[in-house]
Image (cartoon, rainbow, N blue to C red):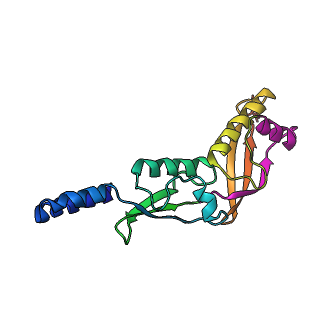
Amino acid sequence: MFLRRISLVGTAVAVIAFGGLGYGVRAQRASRLVEEVAVIGNRRLSKEDVLKHVKTKPGEVYSWKQVQRDLQSVLASGVFDRVQTRVLQESGLRGGVVITFEVVELPRIHEVRFKGLRHIKETEIIDALRREHVNLEKDAVDDPVQVRQAIRIIRKFLMSRGWANPSVTILREMLTSQSVSITFVITREASFRTVAYE
């Protein structure tokens, strides 16, 4: 949006200063070409891996709508942080547009642990997650959406086993900048309280 305002101001100045020549400047700016499509912030994935999801190519006419569709396609791959990943647009050296996808890769899961399970095997919880297509196994992407779904599935599974209002919280430990350990801490609400009288 900021770049559009600048180009419109520049066009207005050109029309005032050069009369009819201003129309040619406006037409030229309206159909600016993409000079470069860059990727920054990627660590595990190559630039080519990211650009597989992008249809905007150098040499083509710049389209703001297509760039936004490209960003949504990159995010839909499921390996980038949806809040921090963004697209930047700036004027190029030759008068065109440079598009830069600034990506933030989600860390990979190194391990998943469960604390507080009583009389229930971890494999039963993992099987319940798999049945619901939630992948939180080693080397999977630490996707916050999947983790929230996992909490819901674990609570539902525990209630089906007679747990009254189980609580599931998450502890995340960053092992490296790209690796995380996830612990599901599970507590069971007592169905009754024992009160001691003296």
First to last magenta residue range: 105-131
Position of the C terminus by quadrant = top right
Q: Is residue 161 above or below residue 88?
A: above
Q: Is residue 11 magenta?
A: no
**Residue nearest the observer in this picture, 145 or 191:** 145
Is 74 on the left-hand or right-hand side of 59? right
Q: Residue furthest bottom?
A: 93
Residue 10: image location, x then y, percent: 22, 63
Left or right: where 1 falls relative to 12: right
Residue 150 in which image quadrant: top right
Point out residue 89 in the picture as x, y percentages from the top left corner: 41, 61
Q: Residue at x 67, y 44 (%)?
A: 146
Can you give x and y, in whole percent of width and height, for residue 169 in the image? 68, 45
The quarter in which the N terminus is drawn is bottom left
Q: How many marks?
A: 0
In the shown orientation, is residue 75 left or right of residue 140? left
Q: What residue do we see at 32% from left, 59% from top?
A: 3
Q: Which residue is nearer to you in this view: 63 or 182? A: 63
Residue 194: in sight, yes or no?
A: no
Q: Position of residue 62 (x, y in %)?
A: 40, 55
Q: Is residue 7 visible?
A: yes
Question: Is residue 119 highlighted in magenta?
Answer: yes
- The residue depicted at 51 percent of the width and 50 percent of the height is 70
- Residue in the image at 34% along x and 67% along y: 95
Q: Is residue 78 above or below residue 100?
A: above
Q: From the viewer's side, name the closer residue of 173 and 58.
A: 58
